[in-house]
Amino acid sequence: MSMTTPPGWYPDPSAPTVERWWDGTTWTAHTRPAAGGGPHPQQQPVAVVVPPNRNRRAVQIAVAAAAVAAVVVAAVLVFRPGGDEPPPDAKQPPASAATGAAPTEPAEPAEPSETASASPSEDPSVLVDQLNGITLPVPEGWEKPQYGVYDGATMTTTESVRCPGGSGYCRHGQVSSRTLASTATTPEAMAKEDIAKAADEFFGDGKIRSKPYGGMSSHKEVAARPAVVAGRTGYLVRWQVTTVKGAGGHVQSLVFPSPGGTGTPVVVRFAFDGGPEGPSLSLMDEIAKGIRPIGSATSGGVGSSIAPGGN
């Protein structure tokens, strides 16, 4: 037994967002927008009311379709408030859709690796004589000067004072290493020949300054002996020098074969001011003991502690 539906506005079976006038017998051509933007599935149970029609099967199909469409519209209303306004996320395509790939964050910079140990030439505690293949320890209170007219690898005391002779500034101590050109055939003969040159360079009329101590008045040999340096047997000669002005001082020539393959003679010249602020004579021996071939395990005195001292 079928139920007759009274005339009224009902959801259009073919367009759920509008309402169509049912005249009690059939659908008419009159439509209007559905209230609230579309029918709610609980407002009209259209599936339970089947209006009479010659083609009953067609009407049943149309009513079922209307019910399904009503449920879909209701779901849209629940999850998309505001009617036809699309949700915010739907307004703009994701970045990956526009560019074809998701943007990538810039890579974090790699953690800095531990820096390699400074080479001997960069180490302020080591004086490197590349030509002769040796390194010398730089004592505390000494430096490797960047400026000045020096022969060979040179280090000096940091403090400078007015020279006693009045010509420029002098350092309390100086040590230099260089290749020795000599016609002598033994380290002993070479050292005894070179000591006068070492004295004149620092206390006499050397290349760096003219008579900074007013010239030398006398000298006295205070040491002359064999010495083992960088694994090679050499010889040293030491003078005490008296100057016209100032307290004078001590000079030393230390000659030994280069630890390189050629065995070329090397001379290390020492010059210490004899005044109360001059270095201790024991520092000459400490520096000589710290001389090493380049690349040796002890690297020419690296890590040694050589303190300055006075007479």
Image (cartoon, helix red, strand yellow):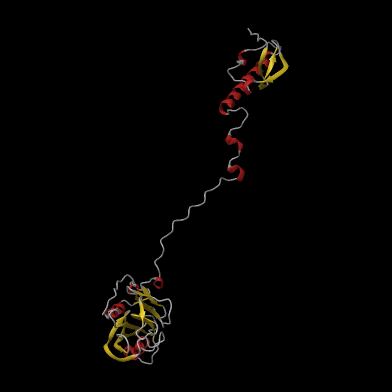
Choose top left, top right, bottom left or bottom right for residue 57. Answer: top right
Q: Identify the residue at the far right of this view.
A: 29
Q: Position of residue 290 (x, y in %)?
A: 31, 76
Q: Is residue 189 visible?
A: no
184 or 280: nearer the eye?
A: 280
The reply to whether residue 153 is visible in this rendering is yes
Q: Which sits in the foreground, 147 or 224?
A: 147
In the rendered image, the quadrant that contains the N terminus is top right
Front position in the image: 93 or 251:
251
Instruction: Answer with the quarter of the image where residue 17 lies.
Output: top right
Residue 27, image x and y in percent?
71, 15
At x 39% / y 72%, what residue is drawn? 120
Name the one closer to the observer, 84 or 211: 211
Q: Would you place residue 34 above or below residue 155 in this image?
A: above
Looking at the image, residue 104 lies above or below residue 136: above
Relative image position of residue 268 (x, y in whole percent): 35, 83
Q: Describe residue 111's horizontal placement relative to residue 32 as left or right.
A: left
Residue 204 in the image, given as x and y percentages of width and height = 36, 89
Residue 59 located left or right of residue 141:
right
Number of marks in picture: 0
Rendering quarter of residue 95:
top right
Residue at 61% x, 24% y: name it: 73
Residue ranking furthest to the top: 1
Q: Is residue 61 above or below residue 139?
A: above
Please identify the quadrant where the C terminus is shown. bottom left
Left or right: 77 in relation to 187:
right
